[in-house]
Amino acid sequence: MSLPLRLLRASLASLWAFKSYALLMMIGLIIGIASLTVIQEIGHGARVRVQGIMESFGFGADAFYISAGGGRLGRRHGLKRTINLTPQDVEEIRRLEGVAMVVPHKGVARTKISAGGKHMTSRLMGVTPNWVTIRNLGLSQGRFITQEDEDRRARVAVLGATPVRELFGGKSPLGKRIRIGNTPFLVVGVLQPLGGSRRGRDRDDRVMVPLATAVKRLSRSDNYSGMRVNLSDPDQREQVVQETTQLLRRLHKLPEGVPDDFLIVTPDELLDLITRQSRAMVAMLSFISAVSLFVSGIVIMNIMLVAVSERSYEIGVRRAVGARRRDILGQILMESTLVALAGGLCGLGLGFVLSWLATLLLEVPTAFSPLGFAWAVGFSAAVGLVFGLAPAKKAAGLTPVEALR
C-alpha cells in the first residue's frame, strides 16, 4: 500500500476514534462556509437578475445606448442635461459599418396630462414605431405608434398603466381624448404594466407619442435625448463604440481635451453600475465570513494541539516501531485537512439549503456561483493545511522516549 493511502487510512481511523474533537473542529467551518456560500449566491443571484431585467428590455450584447449631455454613468456634469443629439448624428451613425439600426427618442420634461376633468403630470417620450420592439414592451390594449403616425406627425398617444389608472380609473381609454399640455391627443394603445420603480420613479408612469410629433408640436428643440444603436455583430461592439465616439466628437466640433458632450452606455457598464452596491455589500460580508473562518482555523489548531498531547503515547509507540517524523507530520496534516474539507462540504450543503430558503421565503434572488463553490472548497483545504501545521510539527518533533514517558 502506498504511503498516501496508508496515511489516509490512519488519519480516518484516528478521526473516528476522536469523533467529538473532529465535530468541534468542524462546527466553526460549517458555519463560516455556509455564510460565505449564501453571500456568494446572493451576490451572483443579484447579478443574474439584473442581466435578466436588461435582456427583458432588449439591452443585450448586440446594442449600446447614446445619451445626450456629458458626464459619466450615474453622474452628470451640471444639474441639467443638455439635449444636443441631432437628426444628423442619427443619420451619420446609421452609415457606420456594423450598425444594424439606430432608434432615437426624445424625452420631454414632466408634462401636465388631462382627461375628463382629471389631471396629473407624467413622463412624456417621443418614440419611433420600432421602440416597442427593441425594448420588448408589450401592449395590453390597442396598438403602438405606426410609421404613418410618425410621417403625419399624428397626435396619438400610448399610455402606461399609471396614467390609465389616474385619468380613467382603470377603464379602457382607447378612442378617448387626452390633453398633453394644451394639445389634444387620441389614445390608441396601452402598455402592459411593468410594475416596480426605477430610481424611485414609477416605471408605468409614462406617455408615448410619435417622435416627430414630440419634436415639432411639444418641444422647442429638434434635438433628441438619446438613441439606441443595434449592431449586426455583437463582437464589433467595442470597435463601433470607438468609431461612434470619434464621429460624434467631430460632428459636435469638440476640440482635443474637451470632454464628450454625450454619454455612451454599454451593457457591461450598466450592469457594473447597478451591481456596484451589491458587490460592496458582498465584499464586506465575505470579509466577515473570512474572519470567522480564521477563528475556526485557530480553533482547529488549538484542539489538535490538545489532541496531540493526549495522543503522545500513540505517537511514541509508532515512532518506536519505525514511523518516521515525516510520517507523523503527514498524518496530522492530513487529519486537519480532512476535517476542514468535511466541514467545508457540510457548510456548502447548509449554504445551498439556506439560499434555497431565502429565495423561497424571502424572495431574495440567489444563483449557484461556481467561483463561490471553488473558493469554499479551496479555503477549507487551506485552513486545514495552515492551521494544522503547528500541531503536526509538535507531533513530529516528539521523540519516542518523550512520547512514552
Image (cartoon, rainbow, N blue to C red):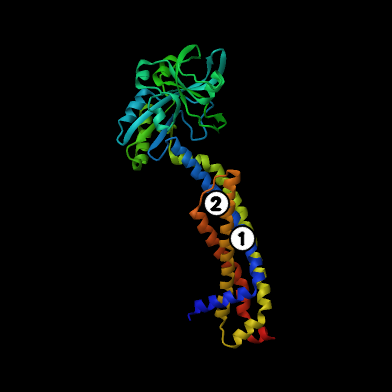
Which of the pair 70/177 is nearer the observer?
177
- Nearer to me, 256 or 204: 204
Q: Which residue matches tag 1?
A: 30
Element at badge 1?
A: helix
Find residue 171 and report its horizontal and vertical position in percent. 52, 20
> Dot 1, how many residues are within 10 Å of its Cα: few (below 14), some (14-19), or many (20+)?
many
Q: Which residue is mark 2?
A: 40
Closer to the chain start, of discs 1 and 2, is 1
Query: Residue 107, position in %: x, y?
Result: 46, 23
Tag 2 secondary structure = helix
Q: How many marks?
A: 2
Amino acid residing under circle 1: Ile
Q: Is residue 27 visible?
A: yes
User: Residue sitting at 60 percent across and 79 percent down?
Assistant: 396
Q: Dot 2: within a 10 Å radius of its alpha carbon, few (fewer than 14), some, or many (20 or more) residues?
A: many
- Residue 288 is situated, as x and y percent measured from the top left of the image, at 62, 53
Residue 351 spot, x, y in % from top left: 58, 55
Compared across the picture, whether 54 is left or right of 305 comes to left
